[in-house]
């Protein structure tokens, strides 16, 4: 409801969206009030430029200033120029006579008015101009709010990542100390390789907690596929390490390319470069050179439609064929919510044999699915419980997303907590002084046990 508030009147506690009308003629102000009566904003009025400036200093959320040009003491141009210093975000408009075009130009150039209207005005044109001016103001304020929120979130993410990096460095130091006592060079080299693999894997997890779960699940699936195929132990271990590192090249990609939204052709080319970047990142480590080959080719397709080299069939190394299959299984399964999610996954997989994947690997892939993946828990079999952080343990399933204080997603709903995720959660709660508990799923009495 529109209301006419005179100087000194009590504003609403909710600080409504308001326009300020300034004119030395009382009948003009009353006419404007009647015109704006049905609009969804409030109106404050002033009979002079000086009075209008005082109102601006004492009022909030003035979205638009509508001023007459010809006023005694202070012209509309001078008033708008001073008003811009007090309320720079407010849209500013000038009312002037037909003969005062030069004054209107001055109001735009000096007073920052974004448009002018002539007296007498046409009512529907004035209404539309005021609505557009208020919309412009709201867009400006919303952009400022979002910019401030993004800045705060980026700072929080930076702090979160710094803490993760510190933990990673601490883990690396601990691993180095453990290796100092090793006497056999072969055993020592293997431990160093494992440390490097885990370090690279954890670094990618700093970009998004989802990657931690993704990489470890892909590695477990690839390992079970290799086991079922009877791959000899040394090659099987290389496949497992390559699976943990297959997305290492994404560390250097910008965030917009990791969101999997609409990409331009240039974005697609940059995204596809991550397979080669991943190989390059570890190529100088002799023990991981073959692992790098698997990483390079894990996006090749059996029918030759993949990247980066367009290999097909058995031109693609076996390790890369296995990782490509495991990667697809984890990504596809993460979007399945049905009670028989594993069955739906294997049904979809059957349609990809000979196209994306080597058909000879599909029986082993079905075996890996049965051994590694778990059908999503059905909520009817569980109740939701809030636990203090000290009672949360590895293996518990989150029933709600966990966000930071400014809305940054830390851990996703449905996540089965691993030790690294639980440690990160404890670190966040300690730094943020969080007082709320963690919402987890608790098995209902008499419910059937999930696979």
Image (cartoon, helix red, strand yellow):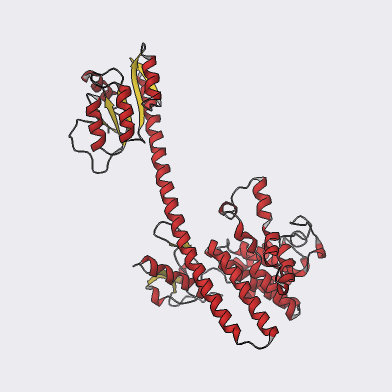
Looking at this rendering, what residue extends furthest in the left direction? 8
Any part of residue 121 in sight: no
Question: Horizontal placement of 263 versus 132: left or right?
Answer: right
The x, y position of residue 444, in whole percent, is 43, 74
Count of marks, rendered view: 0
State whether residue 88 is above or below residue 228: above
Residue plotted at (42% across, 51% down): 149
Any part of residue 81 in sight: yes
The x, y position of residue 312, in whole percent, is 80, 60
State whether residue 121 is above or below residue 61: above
Question: Horizontal placement of 286 versus 18: left or right?
Answer: right
Looking at this rendering, what residue extends furthest in the top direction? 99
Which image quadrant is residue 251 in? bottom right
Question: Horizontal placement of 307 versus 24: left or right?
Answer: right
Residue plotted at (58% across, 79% down): 176
Question: In front here: 124 or 156?
Answer: 156
Which image quadrant is residue 119 in? top left
The x, y position of residue 62, in whole percent, is 30, 35
Placement of the C terminus among the 4 image quadrants? bottom right
Question: In front here: 247 or 154?
Answer: 154
Question: In front here: 297 or 368?
Answer: 297
State whether residue 30 is above or below residue 279: above
Which image quadrant is residue 103 in? top left
Placement of the N terminus among the 4 image quadrants? top left
Residue plotted at (73% across, 60% down): 352
């Amino acid at each position: 409801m529109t209301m006419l508030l005179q100087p000194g009147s009590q504003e609403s506690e909710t600080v409504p969206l308001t326009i300020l009308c300034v004119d030395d003629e009382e009948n003009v102000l009353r006419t404007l009030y009647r015109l704006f009566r049905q609009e969804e904003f409030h109106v404050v009025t002033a009979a002079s430029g000086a009075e209008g400036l005082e109102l601006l200093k004492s009022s909030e959320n003035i979205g638009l200033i509508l001023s007459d040009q010809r006023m005694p003491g202070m012209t509309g141009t001078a008033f708008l120029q001073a008003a811009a210093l007090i309320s720079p975000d407010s849209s500013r408009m000038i009312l002037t006579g037909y003969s005062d075009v030069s004054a209107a130009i001055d109001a735009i150039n000096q007073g920052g008015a974004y448009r002018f209207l002539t007296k007498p005005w046409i009512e529907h044109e004035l209404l539309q101009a005021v609505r557009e001016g208020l919309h412009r103001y709201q867009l400006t304020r919303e952009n400022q709010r979002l910019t401030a929120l993004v800045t705060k979130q980026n700072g929080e993410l930076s702090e979160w990542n710094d803490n993760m990096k510190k933990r990673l460095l601490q883990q690396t130091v601990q691993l180095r100390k453990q290796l100092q006592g090793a006497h056999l060079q072969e055993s020592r080299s293997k431990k160093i390789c494992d440390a490097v693999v885990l370090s690279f894997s954890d670094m990618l997890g700093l970009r998004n907690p989802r990657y931690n779960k993704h990489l470890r699940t892909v590695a477990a699936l690839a390992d079970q596929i290799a086991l079922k195929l009877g791959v000899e132990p040394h090659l099987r271990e290389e496949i497992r390490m390559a699976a943990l590192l297959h997305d290492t090249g994404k560390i250097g990609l910008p965030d917009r390319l990791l969101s999997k939204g609409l990409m331009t052709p240039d974005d697609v080319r940059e995204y596809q470069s991550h397979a080669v970047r991943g190989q390059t990142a570890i190529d100088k480590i002799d023990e991981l050179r073959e692992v790098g080959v698997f990483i390079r080719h894990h996006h090749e397709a059996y029918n030759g439609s993949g990247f980066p080299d367009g290999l097909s069939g058995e031109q693609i190394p076996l390790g890369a064929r296995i990782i490509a299959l495991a990667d697809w299984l984890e990504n596809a399964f993460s979007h399945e919510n049905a009670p028989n999610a594993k069955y739906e996954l294997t049904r979809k997989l059957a349609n990809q044999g000979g196209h994306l994947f080597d058909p000879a690997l599909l029986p082993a892939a079905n075996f890996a699915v049965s051994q590694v993946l778990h059908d999503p828990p059905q909520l009817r079999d569980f109740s939701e419980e809030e636990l203090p952080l000290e009672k949360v343990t590895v293996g518990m399933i989150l029933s709600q997303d966990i966000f930071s204080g400014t809305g940054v997603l830390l851990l996703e709903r449905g996540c089965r907590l691993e030790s690294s995720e639980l440690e990160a959660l404890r670190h966040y709660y300690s730094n943020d002084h969080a007082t709320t508990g963690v919402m987890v799923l608790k098995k209902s009495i008499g419910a059937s046990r999930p696979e």
